[in-house]
Structures are given as structure tokens and as C-alpha cells.
Image: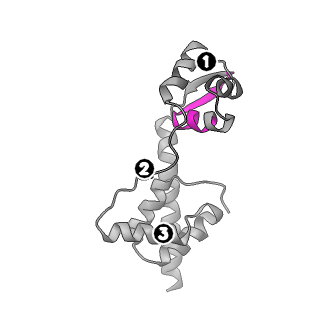
Amino acid sequence: MLNFVPPNECLWEVLIHYFEEKCYWMLWEAYGEHAPSQDTCDHGFQRFKSDDFDVKDKERPGQLKKFEDQQLQALLDEDVCQTENQLAERLNVAQQTISDCLQAMGKILKEGKWVSHQLNERQMEDPRVISKMLLHWHESLFCIEL
């Protein structure tokens, strides 16, 4: 089993391509525990049947933000070497909240400093290439079984 965790967009693209119920089992075989649930696949099929082929995750209602990203960015502008715990204390929130927000902002800790995480072109293409390889592999297996 691969340790590759596919981005959600790749999984939706597989669902669009096959547009059938057997797709869930193909994803489960390919990605194991990282595959979307049957309910998620069913939700995707319903979206596709209603002509919504957008593969990006939709904003969902949830808990309101405890602080604005600008507040966190201002603290980072002051000192990029602050730890998550220090930032959490200054904003009076949990460390996990800071961690989630930094991840959403695309920040990573590199050499003790918070910097924007930039993927190069090859890194952005890798998940798509791997997903396409797996699709071709499954298609060839399916053809052999027939």
C-alpha cells in the first residue's frame, strides 16, 4: 500500500472520470485508509448529477474564527521566530488553533522562522501524475479481468 495521500481535488477528478458506484472501491483499493468514505463519494455523485463539476472543496459553515488572520500576520511581522505557543498566548487561543491557522495561511517553520510554503512546479504535478498512473493501472487490471 502506498503512503501517498492524494489531494481532495484528485479524488474528485477520479469520481468525475468514472462517474459510477464502483469508483468508491477503486479509490479504496488504491488509497486504503486515505480514500474518501462511501458517503463522500455519494455526495460527489449527487453534485455531478446536478452539473456541479467543481473539484475544489466548498466552504462549509462552521465555528467562527477566534481571531483574524491579520492579527496573526501582524505578530509574525513583528517576529518570525515566535513559537506556536508564544503566538497562542499573545492571541489568547489554543496552540492547535494557531497551528491550523498557520497551515491555512500556507506558513511552515523553516530553520526556526515562519515562512510562506511555496511548492515548485514538479511538486504540484506529482499528485496528479501519481493519480493518473493509478487510474491507468486500474484500467489495465480491469481490462485483463474481462
Left or right of 131? Residue 88 is right
Name the secondary structure under disc 3.
Answer: helix
Q: Is residue 111 magenta?
A: yes
Residue type at mark 1? Val
Work out whether 119 lies above or below 12: above
Residue type at mark 3? Cys
Please give the residue where the numbered disc 3 appears in the rendered image: 41
Residue shown at 71% from the left, 28% from the top = 85
Q: Where is residue 71 in the image (x, y as percent from the top left)?
A: 52, 24
Name the secondary structure under disc 1.
Answer: loop
Residue shown at 62% from the left, 33% from the top = 98
Left or right of 56? Residue 84 is right
Work out whether 26 lies above or below 58: below
Q: Residue 80 carries which label?
A: 1
* Crowd class of label 1 (few under 14; some 14 to 19; many from 20; radius 10 Å): some
Please give the residue where the numbered disc 2 appears in the rendered image: 59
Is the residue under label 1 in contact with that under label 2 (CB below 8 Å)? Answer: no
Left or right of 63? Residue 82 is right
Q: Position of residue 16 (x, y in %)?
A: 38, 66
- Residue 96 is drawn in which quadrant? top right
* Crowd class of label 2 (few under 14; some 14 to 19; many from 20; radius 10 Å): few
Q: Where is residue 6 in the image (x, y as percent from the top left)?
A: 55, 54
